[in-house]
Amino acid sequence: EVQLVESGGGLVQAGGSLRLSCVVSGRTSTTHAMSWVRQAPGRGLEWVSSITGSGSRTYYADSVKGRFTISRDDSKNTLYVQMNSLRAEDTAIYYCTNLKDTAVVDRDGVFYYYYMDVWGKGTTVTVSS
Amino acid sequence: DIQMTQSPSTLSAYVGDRVTITCRASQTISNWLAWYQQKPGKAPKLLIYRASSLESGVPSRFSGSGSGTEFTLTIASLQPDDFATYYCQQYDSSSWTFGPGTKVEVK
């Protein structure tokens, strides 16, 4: 069974930086797409960023583009997100998720669709203004 | 970007009730839709993927339907463990979007 454990959260001042980590265990293959999702206090879920299994493609929500960087180190079974220029509105629980893919083949090629099948318990980031 | 809406935002029900939650996408997403359950202080849990496929280990009282822009999550007979918040999520694009959530509470 795949398990995801996040760490690195904490209290930081606005304008500061944090790096979150997510250690993956319980599977032999490391080439899975993964993502970060956050949840502000009392609010709903917001997708933050995703990275493909190879690490060659990354995707970001507009709210974090240019400030956050997702990366992975498969030798350490770890997913990261570097968060810079933090704002009060970045205060949230940050969840790491595994992305399960479905491949669809049509005349234009192969397309992958990813949903979030395994979630970590989250790590809390608080940005003080 | 694809926007997701859910209705109702809150639903009050009794144990044993049949419960239906609706999710709508701002543009067609085929059947690339998932449903998640979240309890207070816990991480979300995947219930349904590809609009109607039940995730392994999820009770069969949960079911999903729909395609295009309108989807539903149905709980056939609400159990005490089902009082929670439910989110839909589209994954048609490389920009995942969640609905605002539906809280199912005890009537």
Image: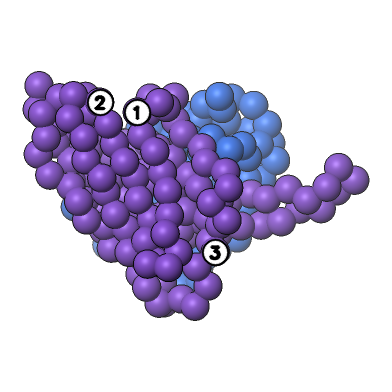
Chain colours: A purple, B blue
State whether discs 3 and 1 lie on one chain.
Answer: yes
Instruction: Name the residue at 18% across, 24% down.
Output: A15
Q: Earlier in the sequence, mark 3 or mark 1?
A: 3
Report the side of A70 relative to B26 (left or right): left
Q: Chain of mark 3?
A: A
Structural distance between the alpha carbons of marks 2 and 3: 30 Å
Determine which residue is flagged by label 2: A85
Q: In front: A67, or B87?
A: A67
Q: Is residue A48 above or below residue A26?
A: above
- What kind of residue is marked 3? Thr
Rendering quarter of residue B24: top right
Determine which residue is flagged by label 3: A31
Q: Residue B34 location in percent, x, y?
A: 53, 49
Secondary structure beneath dot 3 equals loop
Report the side of A70 relative to A20 (left or right): right
State whether discs 2 and 3 lie on one chain.
Answer: yes
Q: Residue A5 location in percent, x, y?
A: 28, 63
Q: Is residue A129 above or below residue B9?
A: above
